[in-house]
Amino acid sequence: MNDHPSALNIVLTQTIGFLLYIFVLSKVAVKPVLGLLDERKATIGKAFNDIDHQKAELAQVKSDYEARLTRLTSEAAAREAAAQTEGERIAAELKADAEERYAELILKARTDVQREIAKARISFRDAIAQSATATAEEIIRRRMDTQLQHALIDRYIEDLSSVPA
């Protein structure tokens, strides 16, 4: 026989070696690598699911905040309107109170003026009375005659008639 292996033996040996290599490689390298790839694929899929879930939660939170903002804006507008109405009511009350006080002050001023006029009349009458008393004293001192007495009395009567009532 021939020392040289036959071509069939070489092909058969190489095929068996290649199959053995593929078998060992699939057990040692391919399965762990495929397992890692599958694990990585699952991790990435879970991460995408988590992201989608978080997006949905964020969309819900955003929707809740927008609804809350709308409600708060509405409440703020209502409060502003209520405050404006209250301010207008208070302003009307203050105006009415001021007008009432003004009327009271005018009435008091008129009363005070009338009282002062009355005091002035009394003071004027007192002055006339003092003048009349002084005149009477003067008449008594001079021991007047009747004609002078009549003239002084006429003057006194004229003074009295010019005093307002």
Image (tube, grey):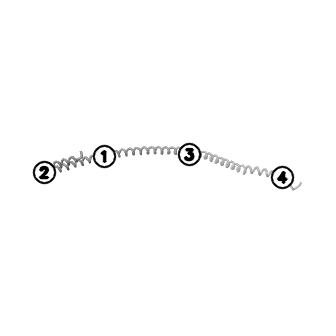
> In front of the other: label 3 or label 4?
3
Look at the image and tell me in which quarter the N terminus lies.
bottom right
Q: Earlier in the sequence, mark 3 or mark 2?
A: 3
Locate residue 46, reporting x and y percent: 64, 47
Q: Nearer the viewer, residue 92 or 140?
A: 140
| Residue that sits furthest to the left in the current view | 143
Q: CA distance from mark 3 to mark 1?
A: 65 Å
Which label is found at residue 110? 1
Determine the residue positioned at 44% across, 45% down: 88
Location of mark 4 (residue): 11
Figure disc tally? 4
Location of mark 2 (residue): 139
Location of mark 3 (residue): 66
Which label is found at residue 76? none
Q: Nearer the viewer, residue 66 or 153?
A: 153
Disc 4: CA contacts within 10 A as few (<14), some (14-19) or many (>=20): few
Mark 3 residue type: Glu
Helix, strand or loop at disc 1? helix
Q: Earlier in the sequence, mark 1 or mark 2?
A: 1
| Residue that sits furthest to the bottom in the current view | 3
Q: Nearer the viewer, residue 106 or 45?
A: 106
Q: Earlier in the sequence, mark 4 or mark 2?
A: 4
Mark 2 residue type: Ile
> In front of the other: label 1 or label 4?
1
Mark 4 residue type: Val
Disc 3: CA contacts within 10 A as few (<14), some (14-19) or many (>=20): few
Determine the residue positioned at 26% across, 47% down: 117
Relative to residue 85, is residue 149 drawn left or right? left
Disc 2: CA contacts within 10 A as few (<14), some (14-19) or many (>=20): some
Helix, strand or loop at disc 4? helix
Locate residue 102, reporting x and y percent: 35, 46
